[in-house]
Amino acid sequence: MTRKERYAFVLDYFKQHAPNAETELLYDNPYQLLVAVILSAQCTDKRVNMTTPAIFEEYPDVEALSHATFDDLFPLIRSISYPNNKTKHLIGMAKMVVEKFHGEIPMTVDELVELPGVGRKTANVITSVVDNQPNMAVDTHVFRVAARIGLTLNATTPLATEKQLLEFIPKELVHIAHHWLILHGRYICVARTPKCDECGLRPVCKYYQKNVKAGVKAIG
DNA sequence: ATCCCGAGGG
DNA sequence: CCCTCTGGAT
C-alpha cells in the first residue's frame, strides 16, 4: 500500500466516522481564541473554558490585557497548568500586539511566533481557524496519531510531521483533517492504551499491525 | 502514575 | 537535543 493510498483510506474513514468533540475551546473573536490557545498547553479544553470567562470579562480586549499586572491576572489562571508562565506570556503577548502590531492580532505564522507564549503550533491554529489558511498545527495528538497510522515516516519533530501531512493532504481538507486527527487522538487513539477495537483504521494502521495484532497472535 | 490541542531556555 | 514549568482529572 502506497502512502497516497493510506492517506486516501484515512481521510475517507474520517469523513464518515470522525468522533464528535465533547468540549471545544470557547471564544468570540481572534483575541479570545489566542488567549484560549495559549492557555491550553498541557491542559484540557474544559479546564481552559472554566477560566477564560473571568479573564475576558476583566480584560475584554488586547489593550486591556496589555495593562494587566501579574498579580491581577495570576489568580485567574492559578488553577491551570503553568500559571506562572502563562500569566507572563499573556501580558507579554498583549503588550507586543499593542506596541508592535497596532493592537491587531497578526495573522501570519511568522508574526504570531514572535509573540510571547506563541509557538508554531499555536500560530498554526490561529491562522487556520481565524483566517482559514491551510496550516497544520501539530500537537501531541496529531504527532502521535500520524506516526501510528503511518501517515508520517520517521518524523521525529512536529515540524517534520507538519510538512509530511501537508504534502499529502489536499489544501481544502487540511483544516478539517487537523480536527479529525485531534479528535481521533483524544477519544480513540489515546496515548497509553489506544482503543484499537473501536478503530476502523486497523486495516491500514502500522501501530495495530505491528503491536496489537502481533501481541494477540503471541497470546492466542 | 499518567495524561491533557506547548513554549522557552540551556 | 534536553529540561523545566506545574494543576487537575482519571
Image (cartoon, coloured by chain):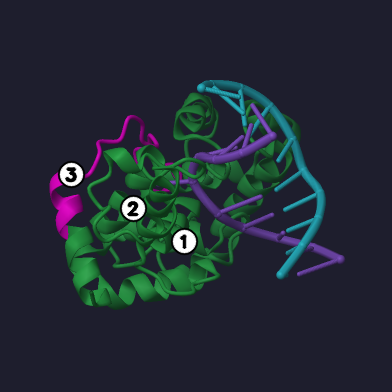
Chain colours: A green, B purple, C cyan
Q: Is residue A207 above or below residue A193?
A: below
Where's residue B1, x and y in %? 69, 34
Is B8 left, or right, of A203 in this rendering?
right
Taking the spot 66% from the left edge, 52% from the top edge, the residue there is A92
- Asked if residue A6 lies in the magenta stretch, the reply is no
Is A179 left, or right, of A110 in this rendering?
left
Q: Is A204 in front, or is A152? A: A204
Quarter holding the N terminus of chain A is bottom left
| Residue A99 image-quadrant placement | bottom right
Q: Is residue A201 above or below residue A33?
A: below
Q: Are marks 2 and 1 in contact (CB under 8 Å)?
A: no
Residue A123 numbered mark, or none? 1
Q: Is A13 in front, or is A61? A: A13
Callout 3: few (<14), some (14-19), or many (20+) C-alpha neighbours within 10 Å? few
Callout 2: few (<14), some (14-19), or many (20+) C-alpha neighbours within 10 Å? many
Q: Are marks 3 and 1 in contact (CB under 8 Å)?
A: no
Spatial distance from mark 2 to mark 1, Cα to Cα? 18 Å
Identity of the amino acid at label 3? His
Is B5 left, or right, of A173 in this rendering?
right
Is A169 left, or right, of A113 in this rendering?
left
Secondary structure under tag 1 reads: helix
Identity of the amino acid at label 1? Ala
Whether labels 3 and 1 share one chain? yes
Residue designated by label 2: A181
* Res. A10 visible in picture: yes
Residue designated by label 3: A17
Spatial distance from mark 3 to mark 2, Cα to Cα? 12 Å
The magenta segment is A12-32
- Asked if residue A27 lies in the magenta stretch, the reply is yes
